[in-house]
DNA sequence: CACTTGACCTGTCCGC
DNA sequence: TGCGGACAGGTCAAGT
């Protein structure tokens, strides 16, 4: 599920609801979703106050006043939904809502703030929450090798091109999905930005010109920016911290638009397989 | 090494 | 309807 724009949207919504609040209670029962020892959770999370909510790549970090942090990766189907206590039970949700009464069968962790609760839902159980000392957050394997933030203006075109070119022998789609090359791009925004740059996803990095890769960075930045402004993309089950869908797919160029006309040239968009992933492409704009 | 392919899970959709 | 298989927005470990 969530790529950079979705995690950014959740971060902003979460900050509104939980900053400054104190954790009253925590419940969790699937060890892979939250592997910490209950004693550690009781000591450093229960009773702690939320100091800050931040994002790095597709990962959320919630800093506590105990000098511990919650690190959260939503992977494919993770959701973080905050509910005020008054509407947590039978609060009346729109019938088309993706989230009904909580907790539900996919709830893996519940954090009770007294006035409301934060639910970590994860249908496929790939995601996880971990509690660790704040200074150790940057030391987890994922952060040690993750690449630069694409929306960081200090990332130069040259630096981006150099990083992509380390994956010379592979497809450009596999290269930008690699989190050590560039952070936060997943299947949706890879397809969107490759269409923007008129590059076929299966093109080998070694066959692309610098000018094309420069255009690709522009496409990544454009897609991610529009997506953040739209509250992210809801394809199957992504929702923001309030349980609402994102609307980016209304503006999508190719993602999930197989059989529909390309917005640039009108040619029918195709769905193919590249880098082991479903991939959407305009066969005319993005020649191989 | 660099790259590709399963595995981790549950749910849904599609064809027979 | 029922059943099998493919597929789903991410990342690792294991394989070539």
Image (cartoon, coloured by chain):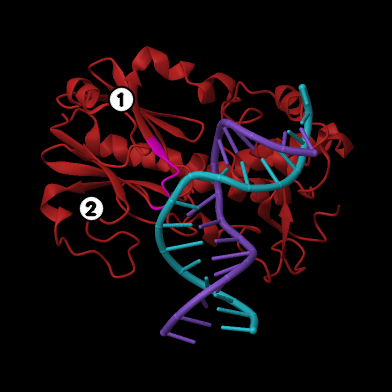
Chain colours: A red, B cyan, C purple
Task: Count residues near mark 2 (Cα–Cα under 10 Å), then give few for <14, some for 14-19, many for 20+.
Answer: some
**Is A44 left, or right, of A186 in this rendering?**
left
The first of marks 1 and 2 along the sequence is 1
Which residue: 64% across, 58% down? A253
Residue closest to the eye, A204 or A31: A31
Q: Which portion, as a residue range, is magenta? A: A123-128
Main SS type for the magenta part? loop
Marks 1/2 same chain: yes
Task: Estimate the x, y position of residue A256 in percent, counting from the top left.
Answer: 60, 62
Chain under numbered label 1: A
State the SS at label 1: strand
| Magenta-span inclusion, residue A184 | no
Residue closest to the eye, A242 or A121: A121
State the image quarter where residue A260 is shown.
bottom right
Task: Estimate the x, y position of residue A199 in percent, counting from the top left.
Answer: 79, 47
Which residue: 35% across, 55% down? A244
Which residue: 17% across, 27% down? A46
State the SS at label 2: loop
Task: Estimate the x, y position of residue A67 in percent, counting from the top left.
Answer: 28, 15
Numbered disc total: 2
Name the residue beneath numbered marker 1: A52
Residue closest to the eye, A228 or A162: A162
**Residue A103 numbered mark, or none:** 2
**Is A57 left, or right, of A103 in this rendering?**
right
> Which of label 1 and label 2 is nearer to you?
2
């Amino acid at each position: 599920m969530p790529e950079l724009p979705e995690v950014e949207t959740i971060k902003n919504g979460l900050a509104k609801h939980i900053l400054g609040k104190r954790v009253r209670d925590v419940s969790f029962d699937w060890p892979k979703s939250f592997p910490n020892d209950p004693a550690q959770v009781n000591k450093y999370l229960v009773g702690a106050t939320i100091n800050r909510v931040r994002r790095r790549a597709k990962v959320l970090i919630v800093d506590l006043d105990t000098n511990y942090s919650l690190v959260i990766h939503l992977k494919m189907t993770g959701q973080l939904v905050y509910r005020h206590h008054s509407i947590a039970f039978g609060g009346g949700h729109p019938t088309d809502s993706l989230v009904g009464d909580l907790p539900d069968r996919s709830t893996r962790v519940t954090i009770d703030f007294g006035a409301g609760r934060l639910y970590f839902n994860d249908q496929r159980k790939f995601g996880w929450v971990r509690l660790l000392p704040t200074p150790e957050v940057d030391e987890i394997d994922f952060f040690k090798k993750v690449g630069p933030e694409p929306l960081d203006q200090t990332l130069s075109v040259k630096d981006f091109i150099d990083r992509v070119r380390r994956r010379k022998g592979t497809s450009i789609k596999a290269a930008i999905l690699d989190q050590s090359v560039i952070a936060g791009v997943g299947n949706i925004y890879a397809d969107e930005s490759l269409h923007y740059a008129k590059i076929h996803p299966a093109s080998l990095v070694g066959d692309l010109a610098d000018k094309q890769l420069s255009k690709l960075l522009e496409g990544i930045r454009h897609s991610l920016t529009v997506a953040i402004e739209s509250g992210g993309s809801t394809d199957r089950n992504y929702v923001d911290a309030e349980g609402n869908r994102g609307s980016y797919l209304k503006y999508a160029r190719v993602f999930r638009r197989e059989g529909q006309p390309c917005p640039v040239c009108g040619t029918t968009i195709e769905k193919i397989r590249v880098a082991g992933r479903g991939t959407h492409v305009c066969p005319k704009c993005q020649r191989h």
